[in-house]
Amino acid sequence: MIFNLNKFEIEDIVLGNKVTTPDGYHENGVYSYFVENSIIKTINVRLSEFYSSGPIFTGQILIKNKLLQADKKLQPIHVFPLFENQTDTWNDGVEVNYQFLIGNTGLEFSWNSENTNLILNYISIELQ
């Protein structure tokens, strides 16, 4: 499975697409999405069980022309240089978070701290 951040899609779920799925929150294994007024507004992909339990995404993430493996080796230094419009970042000692804006789409990467390692927890994309 590929989480395509060029097209903001995972499987057949595409950010901004009109759907017949009822409005509200929907979960499909490793990802969840939120529908409002029949439009997919948010997609969240779970990469670890820091905040929630369930299946973990173990596929690849496509960013520009790079395919990155979603595993414990994926660190902020691999992601940060791939984006230009950073809107926020913070580190509270438990979580390290980077946020970017691509057109009208907010993109958020969150790592949790485990001992001296950072483990990618989730990626969220949202129409602004």
Image: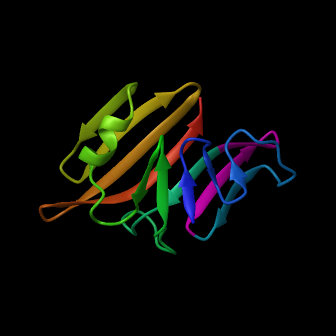
Residue drawn at (67%, 43%), measured in percent from left and top?
15
x then y, percent, for residue 75: 27, 53
Nearest the eye: 73 or 115:
73
- Outermost residue on the front side: it is 65
- Outermost residue on the left side: it is 116
x then y, percent, for residue 61: 47, 55
> In the visual, does 48 lie left or right of 111?
right
Q: Is residue 33 magenta?
A: yes
Quarter of the image with the N terminus is bottom right
Per the picture, the main secondary structure of the magenta-coloured stretch is: strand
x then y, percent, for residue 58: 46, 70
x then y, percent, for residue 49: 40, 69
Residue drawn at (34%, 58%), measured in percent from left and top?
120
- Magenta segment range? 30-41
> In the visual, does 77 lie left or right of 62?
left
Residue drawn at (46%, 73%), measured in percent from left and top?
53
Placement of 75 over or under 92, stated as above or below = below
Quarter of the image with the C terminus is top right
Q: Is residue 45 magenta?
A: no
> In the visual, does 61 lie left or right of 31?
left
Q: How many marks?
A: 0
Res 104 quadrant in image: top right
Res 89 quadrant in image: top left
- Outermost residue on the right side: it is 20
Coloration of the structure image: rainbow
